[in-house]
Amino acid sequence: MRIAVFSEKLWPEGSGGELATYLILKLLASTGDFNLEVYTSTRNPAKIPGASIRTVGFLRASNKVKLFVNILASRRFVEKAIERADTVYIPRFSYPIIPVAKRLGKKVIVHLHDYQPVSYTAIILYSEAEKPMRDFKRTFMIEYASKPLTITLASALATPLMRLIRKWVGAADRIICVSQRHEEIILRSAPEYEKRITTIYNPPPEIPAIEKNLFEKPTLLYVSGDSFVKGFHILLQALRILGRQRFRNFELFVTGNYKNRSLKVLNSLKNRYGLDIKVLGRINYEEILKLHSKAWALLLPSIYEETMSYAAVEAAMSGTLPVSSQVGALPEIFSDTPAEAFFFRPSCPSCLVDKIVEVTSMDGEEIASIGNKLRRIMTVKFDKNVIKKMLVKVFEE
């Protein structure tokens, strides 16, 4: 079977969605039954044995509107690529390709890693569980947390585009979600997807055997940058509380992208309260895995409905205890595991403080034992062969 894949970015560029796409394509290629032709804007993507990867400029754009215009302007190229394929696979945002593929009589599979068909920012906040928010208001709130007012307004005013995106995705033959909670939230806003939607967990990250060699001093990780929806502001408030309480019995490694303003706040907390905070900035994937060999726990104070969270899964499969807010698919993924005891209420800095104190008050042997148990459970839950069979079934049916 010939599959044309259109992914704006490909690992190692991007984040969790791109990593998932890379792992999924590797699984499909490994069967020998699929001829993959991958189109991406990433210039040096990770190699996928058995797949042909072509870098194309029209898939690189700074926002969705520009991406869609680029795709429409490259319509003839897109048509030729689709004509050579039996199936079209769209794991990210190249949705204008869907009607072209359907007009040419091709099967289309859309893989969702976020809430793009029902939210312009691709995010649903945890606070919307009881009362969904209008997309304009949600977009304005999320964008204004990190962007200038002009860009925020432009994004909010573009939200009517969601009607078209929702229609395009609805024309796909199959829509894959990455957790039951993810599917539930998508269907809440787009019930017309019900007959073509399915849930398949993302393949487990390719983590080498990590020998835990815990630091004597409790060591915590935070890997999400200064993202508002990832709860960076909650982390800062929790650190401030810990500083005022003179609780300094931990070392915190902070990775990801940070604006100068965020770095100043972290340095201020470090200097004012004597907290042991090490800001590493953006480091590569292999370095993050090395940090897990020393880490006691990962802090994940998200305030949005996480569809899966590779950061949390990577931590668990590395034997690092996820200390996370109880949002999205995280309770589903960590059900019946030791991690359940370390959930805390979202947007509650004092709740995060309580869990940090609890974890850092334990001894290293106890942490290592919990981590080993968690790793064994997650290895079974994210069985690569089971996930592979489910993916192949969707593509072959």
Image (cartoon, grey):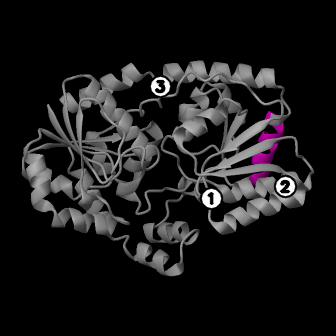
Question: In the picture provided, is 217 more to the left or to the right than 370?
Answer: right
Q: Residues within 10 Å of mark 1 (few under 14, many from 20)?
A: many
Q: Amino acid at mark 1?
A: Asp
Residue 356 falls within the magenta-colored stretch: yes
Q: Distance between the Cα atoms at labels 3 and 2?
A: 36 Å
Q: Which residues are magenta?
A: 349-359
Q: Is residue 392 above or below residue 102?
A: above
Q: Secondary structure at mark 2?
A: helix
- Residue at the right extreme of this rendering: 246
Question: Is the Cβ of the residue at disc 3 closer than 8 Å to that at disc 2?
Answer: no
**3 or 2: tag closer to the N-terminus:** 2
Which residue bears the numbered disc 2? Answer: 241
Mark 3 nearby-residue class (10 Å; few <14, some 14–19, many ≥20) = some
Quick one: which residue is furthest to the front in this view? 44
Q: Residue at horizontal 61%, vertical 50%?
A: 302
| Residue 351 appears in the figure | no
> Residue 119: x, y in percent?
41, 60
Can you tell which of label 1 and label 2 is closer to the viewer? 1
Q: Name the magenta segment's main secondary structure.
A: helix
Is residue 301 found inside the magenta-colored segment of the image?
no
Density class for disc 2 (Cα within 10 Å; few <14, some 14-19, many ≥20) is some
Which residue position is annotated with label 3? 382
Q: Amino acid at mark 3?
A: Phe
Q: Residue at x 40, y 63 (%)?
A: 120
Residue carrying label 1: 226
Name the residue nearer the viewer: 15 or 356.
15
- Choose between 89 and 116: the one closer to the eye: 89
Measuring from the top left, give residue 309's x and y in whole percent: 52, 41
Task: Check disc 3 and report its element: helix, strand or loop.
Answer: loop
Q: Amino acid at mark 2?
A: Ile
Using the image as rendered, state which of residue 346 and residue 101 is in the foreground: 101
